Image (cartoon, rainbow, N blue to C red):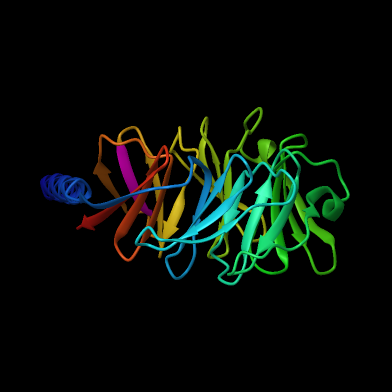
Amino acid sequence: MKMVRLRLKLLRLSTFIIALIFVQQAFGQKLTKTAEYTLTDKPVAASIDRTGNIYFGYGNGDVTKYSQKGELLYTFSPPKRFNITLLESWLGLKTFVYSAPYQEYYFLDRFMNSSERYSVSATSGLDFSGLATIENDRTLWSFNTTTQTLSKQDLIINEVIFENRLNLILNVDELNPTFIRAYQNLIFIADPNYGIAVFDNLGSYLETIPAKGVAFFSFYKDQLIYHTDGKLTLKHIYNQQKKEVKTDLSFGFVLMENNQLFGVTANKLQVFSITY
């Protein structure tokens, strides 16, 4: 009996030491500002592609493409007004541009030439109001706030593959997501009131990350990145390890590439190096 108690005490002590080391490592990160650039306006949407180019959407419908050095590479101005809600440039050769007010989306090529506009409702065959994002060339994910359903749509055959009622799955009255993204065969949906809900590519619920107040997030390799409550969080999406960096800055958007953090405040793009 004494031996069992001793083992329990040693186990608790080792657990405490590991937790203490982890906390010290988590807050041992440091941001060092290396550059700041002025954007054409205050962005309402942001994304980064696989080569590190950064895209911003604005209230007037314009989309700009910047290099990591703050060089304005291209600007696209739509012929008709288009209130941008979400950008997704991770596909590589295409940038997905979505407007919630219009429930429409279009694509930009790498030279910022646009496709025609497509209606989410036309694909789903249902009245739609909510968010949408692209997973690949043929798969569109959408969340309908009216019906509270997460849908996966095949754009080639123009059919809905499946729908799930998320408010019933998550046991909440109503979801009002601000951001949705498909990444590494997972779907992430942020609702500032509840956190970030995670689903597999079949729409099955996996977990909710308790990150209330998060309106936007991004990814770097296997890490989920978001900023809230005066700290930047980098959370590994598979092993659940989390690193946090305290900061007195308030970022509207945070993106990361090659250990460089790109934070947006108003119309300023600030660049930081991160030391581990």
**Number of callouts:** 0
Whether residue 151 sits left or right of residue 85 in the image: it is right
Q: Is residue 252 visible?
A: yes
- Residue furthest right in the image: 125
- Residue 159 screen position, x and y as percent: 84, 61
Is 28 in front, or is 50?
A: 50
Whether residue 226 sits left or right of residue 20 in the image: it is right
Is 12 in front, or is 172?
A: 172
- Residue at x-position 45% and y-position 64%: 53
Q: Is residue 238 visible?
A: no
Screen quadrant of the C terminus = bottom left
Is 2 in front, or is 49?
A: 49
- Residue at x-position 85% and y-position 63%: 158
Is 200 in front, or is 111?
A: 111
- Residue 143 screen position, x and y as percent: 69, 45
As drawn, 212 above or below 157: above
The kind of secondary structure the magenta stretch mainly shows is strand
Screen quadrant of the N terminus = top left
- Residue at x-position 66% and y-position 27%: 173
As drawn, 149 above or below 161: above
- Residue furthest top in the image: 173
- Residue 229 screen position, x and y as percent: 34, 32
Give the magenta part as a residue range.
Answer: 231-235
- Residue 204 screen position, x and y as percent: 64, 54
Magenta span includes 98: no
